[in-house]
Image (cartoon, rainbow, N blue to C red):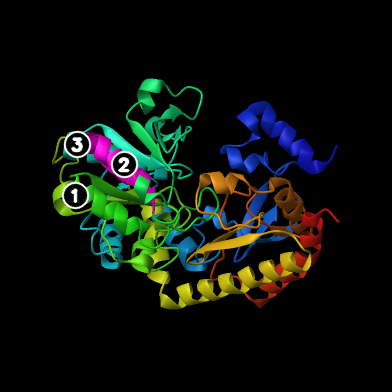
Amino acid sequence: MDEVTGLFDRAKAIIPGGVSSPVRAFGSVGGAPVFIARAHGPHVVDVHGHEYVDLVASWGPALLGHAHPEVVEAVQAAAARGLSFGAPTSAEVELAEAVRARVPMAQQVRFVSTGTEATMTAVRLARGATGRDLIVKFAGCYHGHSDALLAAAGSGVATQGLPGSAGVTRAATADTVVVEFNDVEALSRVFEEQGDRIAAVITEGAPANMGVVPPAAGFNAAIREITSRHGALMIVDEVLTGFRVHPSGWLGLEGGYEPDLVTYGKVIGGGMPLAALAGGAELMQLLAPVGPVYQAGTLSGNPLATAAGLATLRLADDSVYRVVDARSAELRRAVGDALTAASVPHVVQTAGNLFSVFFREEAVSNYEDAKAQDTGAFARFFHAMLDQRVALPPSAFEAWFLTAAHDDAAMDRIVRALPSAARAASGA
């Protein structure tokens, strides 16, 4: 039995699907997933010793590259002092101050352990602040797996939320309204009909969970104007984009509006389980123990996670973003050139240094567009790259991530792999 398949079979016998998060199972590309043993810089190494240039970067957190020595040292020092205290630490305060220094609207910060917790708490806070029940989200935007946000779009312009997962009741999503992304008119109609019942609109600053689909010019500003006019809150989910696409995240890159709440994950924990929600002091003071909106977590603000996050943000200076931006632009050009040379229909879409490749001819502006691509072509492309020791995200609906550690040698390996992978995508 193949070594990889054998390990996957062992995993499936004891772990549902053999993985602890669904996309890792390679369900949309086929085959057995690669089991990683260690990582360094721009590389991951599997359990059999094969080294890959990595374009997953732990789905974003490895902004500096894997196992950056100073981040590892910070975590080791924190671990030596104790793994968890269930009590406040000075590192929490320092990390919250580092967030506020980068994002001035983040006057106060509450740490949690996962992006799902951050968005769930933001929604609860919005409802507590407004006394309203309805939440508006956009089709294709992923905000974690809390029940109320696992609602998918139905037919028509906007529909009352229908459960997007078994085990999620209709009652759990009855107060969620789903609207097509980038459709200001649809959002306006929802508010005209139900504006006095809407607590908040939640959106990814730049969606990257249906592939990268940047907001149309003025779209986020329109959300801000509409919500403000109707007394609703605007929640911007920056779990993916926060501190990755710009020192201040998507808000710093786009500018021109200020949400009420913003959520963070990934980079803020430097690869450790950490997330946060942040906003104006008056609003954040509604959280317990000061206010009536309850949230708690034994591991919230864990000292190892805050140490990793603080070290990462301290190291992520302007030069880091310049490198990641430049490498991203270089790779986007190379991917586009290779696919064009192989006559493969494609669109490369970007949000700062995040990008993804849609295997279709037309630009993608919403979830329906994203689904109308040739996922089979992506699967062929993915496996051809993997065979040449380049690890892409194992789904056509995910962003690609560069790091500051992607040096000339790593980039050269990726670029050399592209022509044959493009031919594989074409079916030739």
Label 2: few (<14), some (14–19) or many (≥20) C-alpha neighbours in 10 Å: few
* Residue type at numbered disc 1: Arg
Is 231 positioned to the left or the right of 72 in the image? left
At numbered mark 3, what does the secondary structure look like: helix, strand or loop?
Answer: helix
Disc 3 and disc 2: Cα gap in Å?
13 Å
Q: Quadrant of the N terminus?
A: top right
Tag on residue 196? 3
Upstream in the sequence, badge 3 or badge 1? 3
On the rendered structure, is 234 left or right of 303? left
Q: Amino acid at mark 3?
A: Asp
Element at label 2: helix
- Residue shown at 73% from the left, 41% from the top: 30
Q: Residue at x 55, y 67 (%)?
A: 403
Quarter that holds the C terminus? bottom right
- What residue does disc 2 label? 189
Label 3 crowd (10 A; few <14 / some 14-19 / many >=20) = some
Can residue 383 be seen in the rendering of this structure? yes
Q: Position of residue 62 (x, y in %)?
A: 52, 60
- Residue 358 part of the magenta-drawn span: no
User: CB atoms at circles 3 and 1 under 8 Å apart?
Assistant: no
Looking at marks 2 and 1 on the same chain, the residue that comes earlier in the sequence is marked by: 2
Magenta segment boundaries in residue numbering: 186-204
